[in-house]
Amino acid sequence: MENMTRRAAMATGLALAAAPALAKDAKVGFAVPDGAADCHHHIYDPRFAYQPGAKLKPPFATVADYRKLQHRLGTSRNVMVQPSTYGTDNSCLLDVLVQMGENSRAVCVVNSHVTDAELKKLHAAGVRGVRVQFGLGNPVAAGEVLPLARRIHDLGWHMQFNMPPEDLVKMEALLLSLPVPVIIDHLGRAVDTTGPQYVTVRRLLDSGHGWVKLSGAYLYGKEGPPGYADAGAAAMGYLKAAPERCVWGSDWPHPDATSGRVAMPDDAILLNLLAKWAPDAGLRHRILVENPEKFYGFDAAKRPKPL
């Protein structure tokens, strides 16, 4: 595997320079509280081979690169989300948890072939959920969702979903029936407060069963920076409905942008959206600190200061 990853590193060359993970020079415009968590980011490490059939093969973005982002934004906790690029091989994810320590959590990708021993190993390392996404290889089939949810229930895990709006809407009844909490990636891809995907996420929130990530504002709307107004409308709707079940994530290093599908966002601008969506400092504290503590099990008595 070492030779394979070395060849991959050479093939991508100066990848981060070509598609910089740290964008431009905007500044965060509010005081980021101690213990603030970035609840959605990825790591792509050249020591771990990409899946041969992966649809997204972004430039490498390592823990060292991510710590620079933390320093820039003022966040001090993080949740690594297993990217589709690695499929169900969580080796990189486990390595990240070792490198980043007690202020780090992760969301893995496993399917029905995972053993109970593997689940316990992942939990001990800091994993707190399973990601399910459609459209990027689908390593977890729709029929595996409920059986997996039953298996992870006793671990206190959740299930995280990323999928096209039409699939999200079709799966609404299943998501509402799962025996574990459900969190939806990237605003549910909603860009207004009337679309069917927004309605589905609202039903999840209103049930008390669902959470949503205030992430990916740059991915699906037509309105660009700095306001991302269409995605922002959905975000503010969610916050009004269930501020206690919303968390924020950067989506760094923005694999859809490095693939050229969308423009590369500025991470500070993405964090600054919270000042508009949640102008009250107490509400921002809830989103960045208290909600992640509840959902991912960070220790409220040990809120780390920014790097």
Image (cartoon, rainbow, N blue to C red):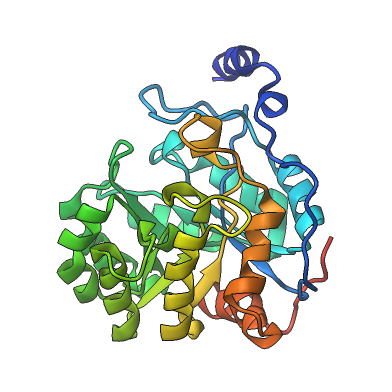
> What is the x, y in percent for residue 17?
73, 26
Q: Is residue 276 visible?
A: yes
Q: Nearer the viewer, residue 124 or 67?
A: 67
> What is the x, y in percent for residue 116?
34, 58
The answer to which image quadrant residue 40 occupies is bottom right
The quarter of the image holding the N terminus is: top right
> What is the x, y in percent for residue 104?
64, 61
- Residue shown at 66% from the left, 62% from the top: 271
From the viewer's perspective, tell me whether residue 246 is left or right of residue 148.
right
Q: Is residue 147 above or below residue 62?
A: below
The answer to which image quadrant residue 184 occupies is bottom left
Tally of marks: 0
Q: Is residue 106 above or below residue 202?
A: above
Q: Is residue 242 visible?
A: no
Q: Nearer the viewer, residue 164 or 181?
A: 164
Q: Is residue 221 above or below residue 152?
A: above
- Residue shown at 36% from the left, 61% from the top: 190
Q: Nearer the viewer, residue 102 or 281?
A: 281
> What is the x, y in percent for residue 63?
70, 43
From the viewer's perspective, tell me whether residue 288 is left or right of residue 140.
right
- Residue shown at 82% from the left, 65% from the top: 306
From the viewer's perspective, tell me whether residue 116 is left or right of residue 11.
left
The quarter of the image holding the C terminus is: bottom right
